[in-house]
Image: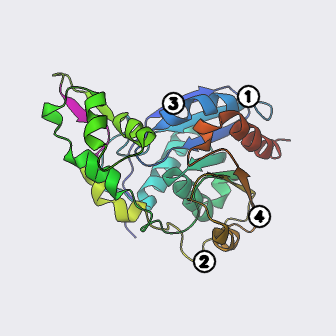
């Protein structure tokens, strides 16, 4: 079997020197920055946490690579843990990062003590789609672009949600010559959308350890009917809903999110 080629992930250290390491994985088109405030809050829970938030390949400040698969992303995180000397961690992932976290826990259960999955389920999201957002990003003529505000206006036809347009344009940065460029590997991510939106778990994959699924009450990513799939892959899982949150409860309802996730993580500290 061919060994998966890994990249050396850029990391952010978000808090503490606690004895229980916690690793936070971001979603599609995000970066470790998305965890900055919640990560600092989580560092204070359960007797203190050493919290890291790596950037996924083709995102943020991590290297770009032509392969964008869950197998590769899991391998990247494992290689990062090995470089850090982390035998096992508490693992938390949001959206795409939640799928990476689920796959890692199922395939390498000895490396994960407790798992928190944020607003995503072990199923395919091919019909859910990010096609409009990616079409809007690919249609932008970057050499003519003057500001992020102008980019938001140009994407409005395809992406009516203001908050989503703001989020997408956080991936725009200035090159050394002053021109705008994407901080993400947009061509590779666009081509990889069917893979990213797919279910990363095979039918027989299981993780028997403690798992918390935290979903947003205003989000459509985790449905009531997803309970059977969650239990099939994670027999010890419990599902909790943060009523006032959408797809990003760690940002939208940070205090309640940290309280709930912190209480679950605290159960694993002696």
- What quarter of the picture does the N terminus occupy? bottom left
Q: Which mark is residue 44?
A: 1
**Disc 1 secondary structure class:** loop
In the displayed structure, 242 sits above or below 122; it is above
State which quarter of the image contains the C terminus.
top right
Q: CA distance from mark 1 to mark 4?
A: 26 Å
The answer to whether 44 appears left or right of 218 in the picture is right
- Magenta residues, start to end: 179-186
Residue 106: % across, % down: 61, 64
Mark before the other along the chain sequence, 4 or 3: 3
Q: Residue furthest bottom?
A: 203
Return the mark for residue 204: 2
Alpha carbons under labels 2 and 1: distance apart: 36 Å
**Residue 66 is at least partly visible in this image:** no
Q: How far apart, in angstroms, are the residues tagged by discs 2 and 3?
A: 34 Å
Q: Position of residue 68 (x, y in %)?
A: 35, 56
Q: CA distance from mark 4 to mark 2?
A: 16 Å
Q: Residues within 10 Å of mark 4 (few under 14, many from 20)?
A: some
Where residue 236 is drawn, which disc sits there?
4
Front residue of 61/130: it is: 130
Left or right side of 160 for 207: right
Residue to which mark 3 is pinned: 12
Between label 1 and label 3, give the one nearer the viewer: 1
Q: Is residue 184 magenta?
A: yes
Q: Who's the residue at 66% across and 32% down the image?
A: 50
Q: How many numbered markers are drawn?
A: 4
Front residue of 155 and 59: 155
- Ranked by sequence position, the earlier of labels 2 and 3 is 3
Q: Residue at x 18, y 36 (%)?
A: 142
Quarter of the image holding residue 149? top left
């Amino acid at each position: 079997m061919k060994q998966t080629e890994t990249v050396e992930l850029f990391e952010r250290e978000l808090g503490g020197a606690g004895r229980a390491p916690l690793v936070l994985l971001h979603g599609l088109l995000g970066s470790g920055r998305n965890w900055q405030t919640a990560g600092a809050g989580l560092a204070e829970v359960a007797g203190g946490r050493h919290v890291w938030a790596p950037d996924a390949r083709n995102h943020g400040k991590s290297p770009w690579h032509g392969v964008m698969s869950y197998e590769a992303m899991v391998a990247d995180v494992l290689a990062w843990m090995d470089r850090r000397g982390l035998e096992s961690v508490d693992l938390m992932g949001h959206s795409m990062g939640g799928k990476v976290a689920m796959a890692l826990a199922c395939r390498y259960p000895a490396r994960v003590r407790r798992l928190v999955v944020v607003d995503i389920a072990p199923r395919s999201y091919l019909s859910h789609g990010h096609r409009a957002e990616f079409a809007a990003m690919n249609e932008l003529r970057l050499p003519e672009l003057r500001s992020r505000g102008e980019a938001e206006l140009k994407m409005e036809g395809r992406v009516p949600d203001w908050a989503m347009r703001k989020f997408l344009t956080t991936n725009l940065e200035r090159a050394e010559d002053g021109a705008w460029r994407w901080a993400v590997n947009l061509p590779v991510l666009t081509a990889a959308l069917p893979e990213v939106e797919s279910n990363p778990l095979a039918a027989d994959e299981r993780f028997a350890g403690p798992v918390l699924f935290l979903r947003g009450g205003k989000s459509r990513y985790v449905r009531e009917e997803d309970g059977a799939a969650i239990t099939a892959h994670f027999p010890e899982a419990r599902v909790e809903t943060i009523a006032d949150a959408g797809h990003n409860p760690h940002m939208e309802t940070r205090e309640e999110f940290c309280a709930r996730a912190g209480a679950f993580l605290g159960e694993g500290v002696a």
